[in-house]
Image (cartoon, rainbow, N blue to C red):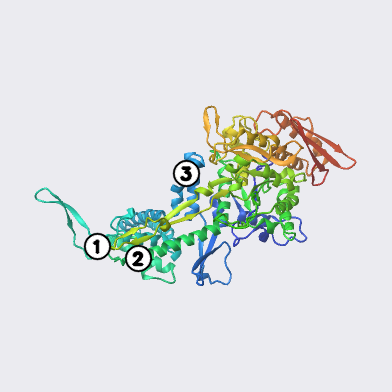
Amino acid sequence: METITQTNRTILFAEINPEKLNILTIIGDVRGKTSLDDDKIKEINEALVVGSLEEFFEKLDPVVFSWCDAATGDIQNSLKKPENIPDSCITEIPLNLDNDLLNMLVTLQDAKGAQRVANVDFKFDSILDMISPKKVMEDIRQVRREIQYTHQKYEELDEGDPKRLDLGDKLNFQFESASKNYSSVLTMLPILIEDTKTRLLFGDGESGQGGQNFKAGLLSMGDDGELKILEMKQEESTQLAIVDDNINRGLIEAFKEDYDALNENQSDHVRDLVVRTFCPLASTVESAVDMEAEIRNYNSYLAYYKKSKENFIKCVKELVQKILGVKAFFDQYQVKEKGMEPKLLITNTSLEMMVKSSNLPRLLTYLNSTNDTNCFENAFWLGIVPDVTMGLGGGGKLQRVRFAGNQKVEKSGTNSMESLASLMNAISPYRITTFFSFAASEETTFSYIATEGVAGFKDKCTPLMKKDFSELCVPCIPNVTIIPKDKSGLILDKRMIMDENGNVQLSEEKEDVMKMWLDGVYVGAAYGAAGIAAAWQCPEYLKQRFHHTSREYPGVRFDIEAGDNALLATTSMTKEISGFTSAIKNSINHTGFGFVFTSDNAQYKGRDIRNVMVYKARNLLSNGNEFEPIYKTLVVTYIERMLRFYSNDFKQDKILSFFSNNPSSQKSKWDADRQYVNSILQDGDDLSYSIDEKNGICNVQVTFSNTTRNLKVELTRKAGGIK
């Protein structure tokens, strides 16, 4: 692999952070240009190319902008920074693994992977509970313990001690993490809710049965052996338990100072709350409870938290699904020894914007610089277009709505089939095999295909068939379900009430249960499909799974559908259903449509296969009976690029050397190495050529068992295309 060192560089056509640079902006004006210089290519790489999820967060830095609307009293959220609103009124909420929603979804993915159970058996509610105030507070308590432990060690050491300075660096990092919970009133809502709840139900904590006047006591034994509880004298029975701690006083002052520094509009009440939360052992902090006022506050906090969380999720859900898609792309590359690691370029602009007639020349000029040269380091082989509009839902138009039903809301950020076709038509000369998936919903899941089949998806792809670019279009189904729609509800908490005797408790009435719905979370199949295809390009990935693998060749000829290949090169995704019926499989096999994942039960040498597997890996090029496997297109692309390199842009004498019978020719080397799972030419394959000197054309025939692909190149010129 000295000539072409990578065959898995991928381009994602999606917008992540509109406040960051996008590829169109960096490329700039290209009038009079046919390519970009090296400095511009380097700038694009540094800004938009990532090799891991961590690097993705670092470079793209997805963020949500939040502000309060004084007219409505609501919290507004946007992925774009609002104009004409002062910066002091806007809160930036990073959407990374520290965010409770995204962290919960990633944890859920990991938990499903660890348990390896189908959706019907998985306890989604136990993970969904992570974004409830109760669970958020548990995370804060863990941060609190770590800060207290580190601060104690810090205070025990002398000033100037190198170890003390190291602990100081650690404390700074821990405070930075803790401060995210009190940088604004909105982020403090879970603390407010749990603090108020604790003080109201002090007698019985989490059980919700407290609220009676609490009196601290000590268990003792009388002279006659009778057990007694002696009441301890204290100023206020409803004060929080507190203990003097000289070391903790420094921590208290540090939190007070940090709160004041981060908030322009300080509040004594909130400052005390921060201290009470992170330094609960401070005798300087007292909190008497006004029951009626605190109940009103608690119910108000809870209602506002529910509303703000619902608004937040509605705003970020589509972006979160893209982030989970990027994670799915990188998750497929699971190897012990790193080799050809997948790289992903995020265009960071919408497909609709990309395919505008004024913008396409910029993209094509860039691809001239990456895919139409003999330097293959930056060449793209794969592409991803998620969220293509589907619209499978049926049903007649209702004249009258009698019961509450689903509201048909047009999803934002989706891509039209027309935009996809425009893109593929424009970039087809650069031979980027592009995986696309349909907008995530219940109608694109494993469960849907298990009952309805793939006919609707095939019909939707008709505009992309019988085109010059059809071989480069790979429809991917089904989408991955992170949380099913019907299992996406979570209980935040219950309203607080006071009975006629003045006792406080959590209400058991159904209408007082604060519940919200995520309405299902899904990941487009294109991310996982491109990810697994990018992974198997790496010889180290294949070597770990197949003994007969050559490190000299990439995985362009690897056929995932052959033999037991799909059982050994499984995805990282956990099975969702028990599998497809024979009827559904027969309909898929009839024409071999699409890049299809399967959740069937399977075994390999007695070992259960617990992960989702690839069932079909086909593009939209059809011979009339069936669609073509994607490896054929990748092999033809690989041969075209190798031929261009070794023939010095298709010079005739060099082409003759490339195909000669000399043992050192490239064709002879491929002929001699047919025994590997990633051999460029395998049993039944053939490679031949003919030259039309009159028209200056070289026709290359690549035969795969029973089918032949023709590659036509113009001698001493750039590649023409595929016929």
Residue 631 at what x, y percent from top left? 69, 38
Numbered circle sitting on residue 237: 1
- Please identify, in this view, whether the residue under mark 2 or under mark 3 is nearer the observer: 2
Q: Is mark 2 on a helix, strand or loop?
A: helix
Q: Check whether the beta carbons of the residues at disc 2 and disc 1 lie within 8 A of each other.
A: no
C-alpha span from label 2 to label 1? 16 Å
Q: Of all residues shown, which one is farthest toward the right?
A: 694
Looking at this view, is 110 or 34 the one in front?
A: 110
User: In the figure, residue 575 lies in which quadrant?
Assistant: top right
Q: Is any part of residue 691 visible from this angle?
A: yes
Numbered circle sitting on residue 111: 3
The relative height of residue 254 versus residue 589 in the rendered view (above or below) is below
Q: What residue is drawn where x is 24% and y is 62%?
A: 237
Q: Check whether the beta carbons of the residues at disc 2 and disc 3 lie within 8 A of each other.
A: no
Specify which label sits upstream in the sequence, 2 or 1. Answer: 1
Residue 515 at what x, y percent from top left? 45, 55
Q: What residue is drawn where x is 73% and y is 57%?
A: 360
Give the side of residue 715 with respect to residue 580, left or right.
right
Residue type, mark 3 in image? Ala
Q: In the rendered image, which residue does mark 2 sit on?
A: 294
- In which quadrant of the rendered image does the C terminus lie? top right
Q: Of all residues shown, which one is farthest toward the left?
A: 223
Residue 355 at what x, y percent from top left? 71, 56
Residue type, mark 1 in image? Ser
